[in-house]
Amino acid sequence: MFLFTVTKPGLRQAGALALCAVCLAGTVTAAVRLAGKSVAASATVQTTIENTQDIGTYFTGYGFEVDLSTAAVDKVKIPKKWDDSFTAFNQVVGESGLTLADYKGKTVEKWTILCPARSDGATDTYCVLLVYKAKPVGAYLLEKPSGEVSGLITAAQTAAEAEQQAAETSAALPDEADYPSE
């Protein structure tokens, strides 16, 4: 036989303990769900960059087809002090899940590679990857000659929406067989 006595201070302690257990269980559940999503999202993107092929694989993970023969590399230095425009640029880079904040004052490789599917006669779109010690630290799209910079995820979503709209438009158009012949 087991005997348990509950007093007011004991009841408060038991309630506090139960509340802590519920909060801990919720935190663990949320952490497990978020960890599963981040692993799935990062599984398609290259984590080390050692050659041009790795850069192509990196951008293919975001849905961009690139022309490996146009790859070019330069060395650029991330400024130690950021103005408003560079902070905004870092937010664009942040769309790819990367940040330049940890690389202030460091010299990085800037890989530029043409994205033919997003280029037309008037403008060329380049995928740009910033690499520090074989690790990608920043990625974005660059339009030339305008110099407009856009994030990878925003550009990929815009392209997917345009493809969907084009598919819906072509499905809505009548077929030639629907017209009577004269």
Image: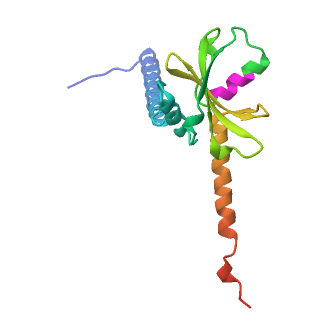
Q: Nearer the viewer, residue 4 or 111?
A: 111
Based on the displayed image, in which of its 4 quarters is residue 137 positioned? top right
Say which of 67 and 57 sits in front. 67
106 to the left or right of 14: right
Asked if the magenta segment contains residue 128, the reply would be: no
Q: Quadrant of residue 151?
A: top right
- Of all residues, the one furthest to the bottom in this rendering is 182
Q: Residue 113's x, y, as percent?
A: 61, 33
Q: Residue furthest left?
A: 1
Question: Which residue is depicted at the point 56% across and 42% down?
Answer: 63
Count of marks, rendered view = 0
Residue at 65% x, 82% y: name it: 177
User: Could you tell me which quadrant the N terminus lies in?
Assistant: top left
Give the residue drawn at x 67%, y 44%.
Answer: 118
User: Residue 53: x percent and y percent?
Assistant: 48, 33
Residue 90 is covered by the magenta coloring: yes
Which picture quadrant has residue 93? top right
Where does the magenta region start and end? Answer: 88-94
In percent of width and height, residue 41 lies at 50, 36
In this view, the residue in front, 45 or 123, is: 123
Above or below for 64 versus 90: below
Above or below, comparing residue 76 to residue 98 in the picture: above
Looking at the image, residue 172 sits to the left or right of residue 47; the answer is right
Q: Position of residue 13 (x, y in %)?
A: 44, 17
The prevailing secondary structure element of the residues shown in magenta is helix
Colouring scheme, one of rainbow, by chain, secondary structure, one colour: rainbow
The quadrant the C terminus occupies is: bottom right
